[in-house]
Image (tube, grey):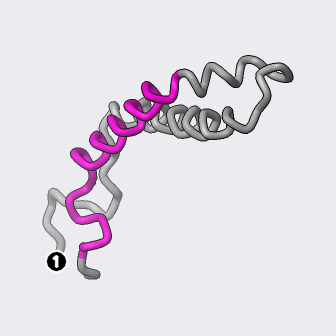
């Protein structure tokens, strides 16, 4: 017999998770472009050099996203969770 207050539907994430997820995706793409920027010749495509220059800030954004997801993850998820 189920409790009256519980349901089988997954809990909806906070309204902050979706924009943070998109910012995290943009930070990852920017990080990949900054890694690629050392292989690109600025004479051929100069905007790529800005990603190389911005590397420390992009790295900081990725670390901030990592900390966010570690703090606000579901408590039962992860590598150390036991199967139910």
Q: Picture coordinates of residue 54 (x, y %)?
A: 52, 22
Magenta range: 54-81
Q: Picture coordinates of residue 46 (x, y %)?
A: 76, 18
Closest to the observer, 65 or 2: 65
Closest to the observer, 27 or 22: 27
Quadrant of the snapshot with the C terminus: bottom left
Residue under the point 72% across and 18% down: 47
Per the image, the residue denoted by label 1 is 1
Q: Picture coordinates of residue 73 (x, y %)?
A: 27, 51
Residue under the point 26% across and 55% down: 74
Left or right position of 2 against 77: left
Left or right position of 45 against 75: right
Residue 5 shown in magenta = no
Q: Picture coordinates of residue 27 (x, y %)?
A: 50, 33
Left or right position of 2 against 46: left
Residue under the point 25% across and 73% down: 80
Quadrant of res 6: bottom left
Magenta stretch: helix, strand or loop mostly: helix
Residue 62 shown in magenta = yes
């Amino acid at each position: 017999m189920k409790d009256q207050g519980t349901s089988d539907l997954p809990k909806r994430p906070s309204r902050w998770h979706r924009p943070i997820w998109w910012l995290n995706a943009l930070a990852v793409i920017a990080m990949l472009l900054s890694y690629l920027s050392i292989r690109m010749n600025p004479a051929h495509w100069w905007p790529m050099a800005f990603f190389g220059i911005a590397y420390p800030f992009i790295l900081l954004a990725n670390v901030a996203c990592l900390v966010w997801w570690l703090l606000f993850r579901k408590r039962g998820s992860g590598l150390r969770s036991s199967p139910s």
